[in-house]
Image (tube, rainbow, N blue to C red):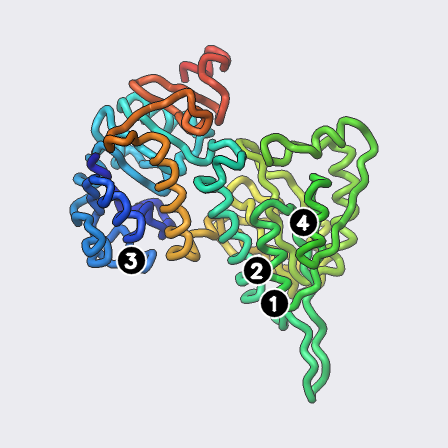
């Protein structure tokens, strides 16, 4: 197959969908790989490295005009116009963006959004959300250390003792757990909270204290179990109790890292303005949910602001701040997914019986297969299915 790797043009996007390592493997399988000139520069990969791996360096029209296009984020209208009807597109396409999925469908593209892959053991090697969230959790702590006006670890010096920073992590998914581990390495004292009781053991195994908010009803316990590895919206009664617990912990914290996200929904508010106002001057909040409205209403997406003496960092794409490793992990995710849609003869094969392929398939042959995330179009309300 002809496989194209275009340069990402979305503002702030520094990653690339292939590396010399994955290009070499694709070429060894008999594929022809076309990499747009400059596609890897922001990820520290020069054109020469791709060429040495067997790729041909070309223009945007050549990379986007390939039969199989690998991208980091969904193409915009200009990029879609360069793609061939019938082409296959694989990337992080945002399965909740029905308008863009409709444009891909109208173009006749077969599109796979890897964020929609099921959270199963078999899909772990292509789990783009986990690979990129892991990087975001790591970078969040480094950003916090950068903006925090004191040391992270405890230091005993001839001039006196410096206390260790107190870090509060809200949400203990992949990003939250990595944030805990990284903050621990830097010598901080850490507490963490999550709606899912199953993560308590993981939090404590990393050296953090679990902030427990007991459940009072069966509804609260059921919601806390989550779905497919993701948290679900919690009842208002539990959220009120959690807010009180967070408020008390936040007053003692020096750094707060919030990571709570619910696919397809606005991020839940975990850190209220009154809580921020009660925090110590010089404290730092890193809001990983900034792109979905933020876990704190004071967060401004893609900006660093100071409110009530607290620095709030709202970078919406933390993985792009570590582009070399983020690209390497993402490219391997893509390579593992391609094993499911390319047959032994090196041709594209759509196997809808495969649960991973079926979950990621957004549109094909001019038809929207899924809308509103993972809801089958046939099962969605007529007004939405035909949007």
Discs 4/2, front: 4
Q: Is residue 240 above or below residue 161?
A: above
Outermost residue toward the right in this view: 216
In percent of width and height, residue 105 lies at: 32, 22
Which callout, 2 or 1, points to the residue nearer the camera? 1
Q: Position of residue 4 (x, y in %)?
A: 23, 40
| Element marked by disc 3 | loop
Q: Quadrant of the C terminus?
A: top left
Q: Residues within 10 Å of mark 4 (few under 14, many from 20)?
A: some
User: Label 3: how many residues lie within 10 Å, few (<14), some (14-19) or many (20+)?
Assistant: some
Q: Nearer the viewer, mark 3 or mark 4?
A: 4
Q: Are marks 2 and 1 in contact (CB under 8 Å)?
A: yes
**Residue to which mark 1 is pinned:** 186
Instruction: Tell me the residue at 45%/42% (across/down).
Output: 125
Q: Which mark is residue 202?
A: 4
SS for callout 2: helix
Q: Residue furthest top?
A: 382
- Which disc number belongs to residue 45? 3
The earlier-in-sequence mark between 4 and 2 is: 2
Residue 141 is labelled as: 2
């Amino acid at each position: 197959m002809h496989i194209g790797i275009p340069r990402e043009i979305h503002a702030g996007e520094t990653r690339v969908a292939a590396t010399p390592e994955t290009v070499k493997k694709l070429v060894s399988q008999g594929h022809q790989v076309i990499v747009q000139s400059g596609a890897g520069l922001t990820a520290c990969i020069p054109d020469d490295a791709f060429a040495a791996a067997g790729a041909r360096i070309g223009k945007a029209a050549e990379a986007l005009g390939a039969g199989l296009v690998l991208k980091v984020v969904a193409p915009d209208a200009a990029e879609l116009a360069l793609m061939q009807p019938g082409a296959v597109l694989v990337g992080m396409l945002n399965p909740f963006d029905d308008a863009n999925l409709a444009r891909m469908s109208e173009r006749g593209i077969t599109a796979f959004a890897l964020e929609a892959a099921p959270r199963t053991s078999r899909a772990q090697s292509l789990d783009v959300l986990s690979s990129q969230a892991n990087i975001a959790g790591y970078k969040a702590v480094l950003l916090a250390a950068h903006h925090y006006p004191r040391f992270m670890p405890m230091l005993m010096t001839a001039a006196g003792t410096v206390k260790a920073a107190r870090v509060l992590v809200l949400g203990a998914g992949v990003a939250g757990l990595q944030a805990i581990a990284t903050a621990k390495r830097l010598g901080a004292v850490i507490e963490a909270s999550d709606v899912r009781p199953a993560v308590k053991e993981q939090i404590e195994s990393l050296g953090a204290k679990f902030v427990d908010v007991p459940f009072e009803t069966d509804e609260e316990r059921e919601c806390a179990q989550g779905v497919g590895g993701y948290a679900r919206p919690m009842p208002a009664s539990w959220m009120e109790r959690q807010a009180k617990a967070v408020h008390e912990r936040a007053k003692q914290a020096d750094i707060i890292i919030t990571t709570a996200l619910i696919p397809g929904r606005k991020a839940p508010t975990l850190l209220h303005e009154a809580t921020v106002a009660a925090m110590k001057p010089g404290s730092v909040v890193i809001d990983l949910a900034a792109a979905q409205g933020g876990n704190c209403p004071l967060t401004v997406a893609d900006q660093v602001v100071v409110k009530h003496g607290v620095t709030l960092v709202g970078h919406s794409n933390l993985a792009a701040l570590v582009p070399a490793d983020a690209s390497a992990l993402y490219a391997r995710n893509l390579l593992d997914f391609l094993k499911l849609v390319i047959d032994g003869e090196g041709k594209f094969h759509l196997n809808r019986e495969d649960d991973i392929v079926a979950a990621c398939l957004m549109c094909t042959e001019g038809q929207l297969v899924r809308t509103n995330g993972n809801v089958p179009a046939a099962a969605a309300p007529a007004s939405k299915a035909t949007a």
